[in-house]
Every structure is written in structure tokens, then in C-alpha cells.
Image (cartoon, grey):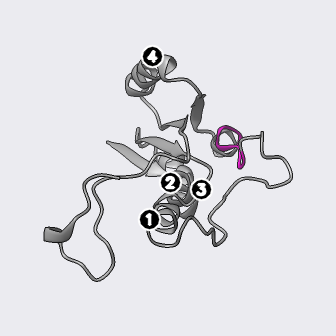
Amino acid sequence: MVDIDGDGSFLMNVQELATAHIENIPAKAIILNNQHLGMVMQWEDRFYAGNRGHTYLGDPNHRKLIYPDFVAICHGFSVKCERVMYKRDLKAALQRMLDANEPYVLDVITPYTEHVLPFIPAGRTVAEMIWKI
């Protein structure tokens, strides 16, 4: 099983790393880490002229750092984790993750400007889904 998750969503259930480790469940997770609550930010960009309402998850005093440090968090739960900064490194990292017989997390740094498509605006139906920027 591979969970593909955003950084904000992953933080909401980070305690499951303990379950995976203690129960020896070889679950895998890929964190699409854009340092933001990405789907909320997407709404801010599309419907609110980019006005931000505390959707930045990084440390505003140290914007060049990756925060939080998911590699350190995972290691604290005794779960293997590696950070992928460049697209060229992704394929090999994915293979290492899939080959592992234990819980494993990939912290994949992604640009915050990437939006998730398609998506359904509030109060709309699947027939009114937005497919492009």
C-alpha cells in the first residue's frame, strides 16, 4: 500500500508512523511537500486573489529551510524516510521505497505553485469540475 499525501494532511495523522513501526506494517507514504495547505491555497489563488489565510506551513523566519523536517520526524518513530528534492532522483527513491520490507516515507519537495486538478468548487457538482488552470 502506498499513501500519497500532502504535507498538511500527513501531519494530521503522523502518529500512524508509530502503528506502522510497532505492528511491522510495511506501509509506504509519499508526502507531496509544498510547505503549504495546498488545496486550501489553491482555493485562495482561484477564488480569493491569492490572499493567504495562514496556509503556509513553513517557518516564516527561516523560509529557506524545509519545515517541519519529516525525515527527522520519521526517524523519531524509527521509520525510514528520505527527502527527494529533484525530479531526477525520484525514480530511484521510489524503487528504494517499494523494495523496503518495512514502513518507508518519501518526502518529495514540490513547488507550492502546482495545483491539484481536477477539483470541484464549493456548492458545485462533479459535472462542474474544473479541469484546467
Number of marks:
4
Give above or below for 68 relative to 43: above
Q: Where is residue 47 in the image (x, y as percent from the top left)?
A: 45, 71
Query: Label 1, label 4: how many angstroms apart (C-alpha)?
Result: 35 Å
The residue positioned 80% from the left and 55% from the top of the image is: 60
First in sequence: mark 3 or mark 4? 3
The residue to which callout 2 is attached is 19
The residue to which callout 4 is attached is 92
Give above or below for 105 relative to 123: above
Query: Label 3, label 4: how many angstroms apart (C-alpha)?
Result: 26 Å
Q: What element carries label 3?
A: loop
Q: Which of marks 4 and 2 is in front?
A: 4
**Image side of residue 73 versus residue 92, left or right:** right
Q: Is mark 1 on a helix, strand or loop?
A: helix
Q: Give the range drawn in magenta.
A: 67-72
First in sequence: mark 4 or mark 2? 2
The residue to which callout 1 is attached is 46
Tell me the crowding category of disc 4: few under 14, some 14 to 19, or many 20 or more residues within 10 angstroms, Cα based: few
The residue positioned 41% from the left and 19% from the top of the image is: 91
Tell me the crowding category of disc 1: few under 14, some 14 to 19, or many 20 or more residues within 10 angstroms, Cα based: some
Q: Is mark 4 on a helix, strand or loop?
A: helix
Give above or below for 26 relative to 52: above
